[in-house]
Amino acid sequence: MTSGTKESPAVQRILSLHFDTPESERLATYTASGGYSACRRAFARPPEDVTEEVKKSGLRGRGGAGFPAGVKWGFIPKNTERPMYLCINADESEPGTFKDRYIMERDPHMLLEGILITCWAIRSHDAYIYIRGEFEDARRVLQAAIDEAYAAGHLGANPCGSGWRIDVTIHRGAGAYICGEETGLLESLEGKKGYPRIKPPFPAVVGLFQSPTIINNVETIACVPWILEHGGEAYARIGVGKSTGTKLWCISGHVARPGVYETPLGVPFRTLLEEYAGGMRHPDRPLKAVIPGGSSVPVLTASEALGVNMDYESLGQLGTMLGSAGVMVIEEGTCMVWALAVITRFYAEESCGQCTPCREGTSWVNDIMWRLERGGATPEDIALVHNLCDNMIGKTICVLADAMVMPAKSFMKKFKPEFDAHIAAGRCPLPQPVRD
Amino acid sequence: MPKIHIDEREIEAGANENLIATAARAGVHIPHFCWHPALSVAGNCRQCLVEIEGVPKPQIACNTPLKDGMVVRTKSPAIQEARRGVLEFLLLNHPIDCPICDQAGECRLQEYYMSHGLYDARRNVDKVHKPKVVDLGPHVLLDAERCVLCTRCVRFCSEVARSDELYVAERGSHSEIATFPGQPLVNAYSGNVVDICPVGALLSKEFRFKSRVWWLKKADSVCTSCARGCNVRIDHHWNQVQRQVPRYNPEVNSYWMCDRGRTHIDWINEQRVTAAQHGEQTLVLREAFELLAARLAAAGSAVTVVLSPKLANEDLLAWRHLFTAVLPAAHLGAGSLEPAQPEDDILRRADPHPNTWSVQALELAADVRALWQAPAKLLLLVGDDPVGWDPALAAGLARFDFVAAALTNHNATATSVLAAGGLLLPLATHAEYAGTFNNYAGRVQRFEAALAPFGSALAAHEMAVELALVLRREFWPAGKPRTSVQQGIWQQLAPAIPAMPRIDWEHVPPEGLNPTWKPTARPRSVLTGEDATDAYSWGAAPEAARAGEHG
């Protein structure tokens, strides 16, 4: 996969600007292009001002939920005696998502500068980067960048002459999807089993080590230096409506050029597919469906996808979500029952097992889904899965159950004839189903 | 305090009270598995979902902050369906083996299936199988297939016993409760996990397959294994104690008791002295008392009486009265040679006796070995097993003209007494009569009769009254009481002793009476010498949550 290189007047790149620069991960490269100047601007202003600037930018959390980052920082309680913590969620494990890895491998100092600014804004001295265990390359590059930054005095006791100590520590996960859920991440970071926490209390009040904690996605924090450099209003002018700024799209599946591409929010899906990803991989197999935001969001049919603009609101209107921007493109000839069964298997395996409906429900639905795919299911099974989904969604501590229910219900509704055909045939009715 | 509406009923929430506890006070039971009033909130079972006006999703009652004017519905169709759905998930991989499960009859899965389930099984795929009959430790077995993973046991071990033996291994539908390799469940309070397990997953090795719970008759009692005096319930059947479980008392033991107290019940059921015996001859009780009376008359005041700190207040008061006022004996004292037990800051006390406080208040405390040596013609032992604790004492029995012992069990002392040609009288245990103990802090706690006396066993205070009768001496200073013997003892004998509390024996509340009186001298523990003031107090548990919170 390659990062996007397509240039056009409409294209504005913030995050991926230096992805293709040689030695882009080095401090010298970063400072040569003006790096570590935004944080100096930030340190010169009161922390509340920095938060206000990010609020003005309209920057929304890029981890999946899309919550405004500046507003989140504002939840940090004033007048507390406890330390504040910043946690960077680099446990990028939503299927179809691989943007944070690019940032960490190709522009780690952009992330570190974002961390400096955020730590100042929320008055934190300690930031933890919780990185997915499988990301060994990213960890190595990121650690080298941290070492360089310490050596140059950008991190440590006196970053950029601010006198505000900031230490950054990488913590590796051990391969559990649930540790990407922010409170599961906190538990794991504390050395416990990655069980999401019940809320309230929310992490901004009681988070890591019982202290106020802000947890942000890698991409979110990587946007922060640009916002401080150019101003929140400049950022807010990019994109559409409340979907401000640019977005890294992780395009995978049956396209000619899968990869990470950056565009302003609101780009039509058709543009992403045809101009960036090079269209479908086989000209004779047209688009069948798109999962627009990682495996846990409702699927779009081809006609829905080809008419939609990629921003939070437009996707919301179609009943789906922008999520983590893991855009999975599915071509004609793909067995949708099989595709859904692959998804349900993921969630059944990754359920932490804490809440009853998710622990039992994901594995029950998964068992039924594979029986549908392999044969032996009955017409009642479809209604049963719908009912089980209703009994799971919105009834658990975290949204892992919802993350399986949303694709399951949308697949079964939008591609119902395929599910019926499986039941009627007692097996997959496609002569040569696409399975790669 | 916020006022909330639960199912059209208005109620004021208590301090630090959650919705489940508040609803319980309003008479509304919100079904739940994982929440326990004395443990942290886990919020994982999802059975306590309720509808809150203005909130789109159903909320868990255990962790929802209470706000003034909040309107809560626990019986709406959506909530009924949500509960049914959660229950179906809980029972999905459950073996449904109620006919062979010890928990049957006090199982929340059974109860909630009847109240919220009643659906036909829709399971159409294979069940997940998990380990069964897992030996977790000396007292507890696990059937992982019956487990609902509420983690009450995990939280108990970490928060109350502070030993962290249990955890949840694996994840998703393969999750199971487990111990770490080579680190079994050995904390001194492990049996409590069986009590708080809402289903049949954690089983007591001692109670397993002993009795169906619906046969059990229950009596409030007090544990006699140490000076803490944990409030317990004796569950009995066939006139045998089947199990002893803790009874909630926020001032004494919260919801808990230690394993030693819990399992120390065989002595009530087995090896009991059920008839009077003189040498090899079995006597009718009346003959035995006449024999003892004759010997007492012959010995005059050259009598040594050794009482036990395991005897109840009524027993100590009666024997003390008998041998000080009615028939003064040269030597009268109470003590034991039983060694101290391990102590901790949770419940366990070093003093292994339930009534040391009263022994000291009655000024009876004495050294057993010294009493043994004291010049006397007749030795009378009531309770305990001095020879068992110190076999060397057996030789000393020959020194007396006559030896008599009222004992509960055929122990070493009983054997020695009979071998010395002495008299053995059948003594009832605390499970066979009602009385009171004063725990280490002086708290008066009443226990009720659970069993019928074994054979012709008599409670110690009944023996004292009976003996006076046979001796043709008036026992009662103010005439035979028209109330119970115990009440008579408190009314007629206790007031003479300034250190003893003034209580209405008939109306000692189930949670006991706090010592509001001031004893003349603050009692000190015989074993540790420490000030026996209750320094350890439990946090106030929600009052309303008490009902039915066991099991």
Image (cartoon, coloured by chain):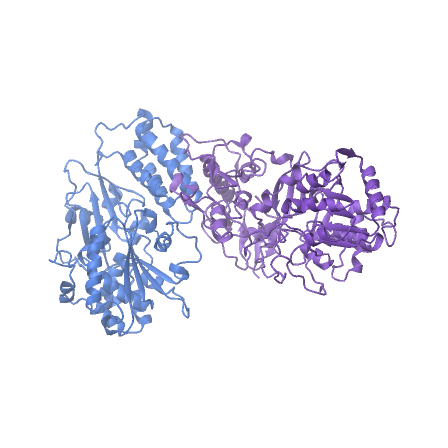
Chain colours: A blue, B purple
* Nearer to us in this view, B199 or A17: B199
Which percent across, then down, holds residue B270?
A: 65, 36
Res A361 → quadrant? top left
- Locate residue B185 relative to residue B309 in the image: left or right: left
Q: Is residue A79 left or right of residue B297?
A: left
Camera-nearest residue between A209 and B340 = B340
User: Residue farthest to the top?
Assistant: A425
Residue sitting at x 36%, y 53%:
A191
Residue closer to the observer: B1 or A262 = B1
Residue B253 percent coordinates (x, y) = 60, 53
Which residue extends farthest left? A22
Task: Locate residue A373, reporting x and y percent.
Answer: 31, 30
Above-or-below relation of A147 to A180: below
Question: Against B314, is A413 above or below?
Answer: above
Viewer can see residue B37: yes
Considering only vertical position in the picture, is A75 above or below B131? below
Q: Is residue A228 left or right of residue A24?
A: right
A123 over B480 or under it: above or below: below
Is residue B8 among the parts visible in the rendering? no
- Residue A133 versus residue B84: which sits nearer the camera? A133
- Name the residue located 26 percent from the left edge and 68 percent from the top edge: A156
Quadrant holding the C terminus of chain A: top left
Give x and y (percent) for residue A221: 27, 60
Give the total of numbered labels. Answer: 0
Quarter of the rendering containing residue A340: top left
